[in-house]
Amino acid sequence: MSDDLARILTARGYRLTAARRVILDTLSESGEHLTADELTEQVRQRSTAIGRMTVYRTLDLLCDLGLMRPVYQGTGAAHYVLMRDGHHHHLICTGCGRVVEFDECALDEAHEKIARRFGFEVEGHLLEFYGVCEVCRSKAAAN
Ligand SMILES: [Zn+2]
Ligand SMILES: [Zn+2]
Ligand SMILES: [Zn+2]
């Protein structure tokens, strides 16, 4: 994944600096949901030479390029997620807060329809379904 990110970055004319390399590696190895502060902390465990502003600016750049998106849940800091092939999907349990990732995507048709209607060129989407997970449902059933 970090190679994919690196390739896109350089294809768009951005230099793959040593700091960016470390940040991309950290992102791809540490799972997908990190706040900017969590990412900074993990990056600095690998290289204390990389400052907080560099991490923040790189995150901004990745968001500008559509490779990451901030996700806001509740009132806390945004979590940043990777947009694999332009999309990212969640099932979120309103009972326990569990977040499940899933790959299936049936939105291509909806993309086209909506894009046409608004004269929009869709580049990706972040999809979140809210509901109650299996564990919470069986707990509710047991009561
Ligand atoms: Zn649950
Ligand atoms: Zn996710
Ligand atoms: Zn999708």
Image (cartoon, rainbow, N blue to C red):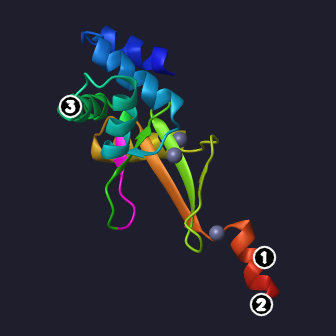
Of label 3 and label 2, which has the lower sequence position? 3
> Magenta stretch containing residue 27, yes or no?
no
Q: How crowded is mark 3: few (under 14 residues within 10 Å), some or many (20 or more)?
A: few
Q: What separation in Å lies between label 1 and label 3 (alpha carbons)?
A: 44 Å
Disc 3 secondary structure class: helix
In which quadrant is the C terminus drawn?
A: bottom right
* Front in this rendered view, residue 132 or 47: 47
The mark tally for this picture is 3
- Judged by depth in the image, the label closer to the viewer, 1 or 3, is 3
Q: Nearer the viewer, residue 86 or 26?
A: 26
| Residue with the mark numbered 3 | 57
Q: Name the residue under label 1.
A: 138
Q: Where is residue 69 in the image (x, y as percent from the top left)?
A: 36, 42
Residue 51 can be seen in this image:
yes
Q: What element carries label 2?
A: loop
Give the structural element (helix, strand or loop) at label 1.
Answer: helix
From the top left corner, tell me how far across and down residue 78 is, in percent.
33, 53
Q: Which residue is drawn at 29% across and 39% down?
A: 120
Q: Which amino acid does label 1 sit on?
A: Ser
Does residue 93 sit above or below 128 in this rendering? Answer: below
Query: Foreground residue, 104 or 116?
Result: 104
Q: Mark 2 points at which residue?
A: 143
Q: Give the range drawn in magenta.
A: 69-74
- The amino acid type found where label 2 is placed reads Asn
Q: Distance between the residues labelled 1 and 2?
A: 9 Å
